[in-house]
Amino acid sequence: MSHARLWRRVKRDVRKGFAWTTDRAVAIQFTKVGRQDPKGSRIIGCLGSATVSRQDVIAYFGTPEGDETECIIDPQRIGRVTYEEITTPIA
């Protein structure tokens, strides 16, 4: 699979996601479970950013320590998504 085709697939997977976090560092951790690139030398993950209305948040979970916050959002209610490719070398 070419890099361009893989990137389209990864973006599509992100767009379908129900669970979103409000913490960029947490989101980057989740990109490490992306897909291997065509050469098998790195993981290609996708970080999606979107702004939604408060009323579109179905559920919000957070810890008192603030370790991780998660929002459950209906993917059909998410408008414009900005994508950023995050790659991690395979050790």
Image (tube, rainbow, N blue to C red):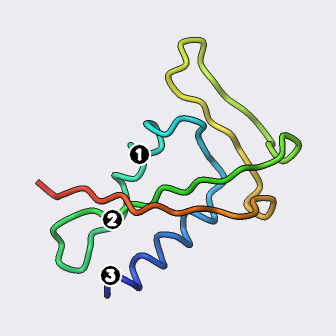
Which residue lies under the disc numbered 2? 44
Quadrant of the image containing the N terminus: bottom left
Residue that appears at 78% across and 64% down: 76
Name which residue type carries label 3. His
The image shows residue 88 at horizontal and vertical percentages of: 25, 56
**Left or right: 31 with respect to 62?**
left
Identify the residue at the far left of this view.
91
The image shows residue 71 at horizontal and vertical percentages of: 68, 39
The image shows residue 51 at horizontal and vertical percentages of: 72, 50
Identify the residue at the far top of this view.
64
Look at the numbered discs 3 and 2 and tell me whether their residues touch, using CB distance below 8 Å. yes
Name which residue type carries label 1. Ile
| Structural crowding at the residue carrying mark 3, measured as other residues with C-alpha within 10 Å and reported as few (<14), some (14–19) or many (≥20) | few
Mark-to-mark CA distance, 1 and 2: 11 Å
Nearest to the observer: residue 64 or residue 83: 83
**Left or right: 83 with respect to 41?**
right
**Mark 1 element type:** helix
Mark-to-mark CA distance, 3 and 2: 9 Å
Residue that appears at 61% across and 46% down: 20
Residue that appears at 34% across and 52% down: 32
Which residue lies under the disc numbered 3? 3
Say which label, 3 or 2, has the lower sequence index: 3
Which residue lies under the disc numbered 1? 28
Identify the residue at the far right of this view.
55
**Mark 3 element type:** helix
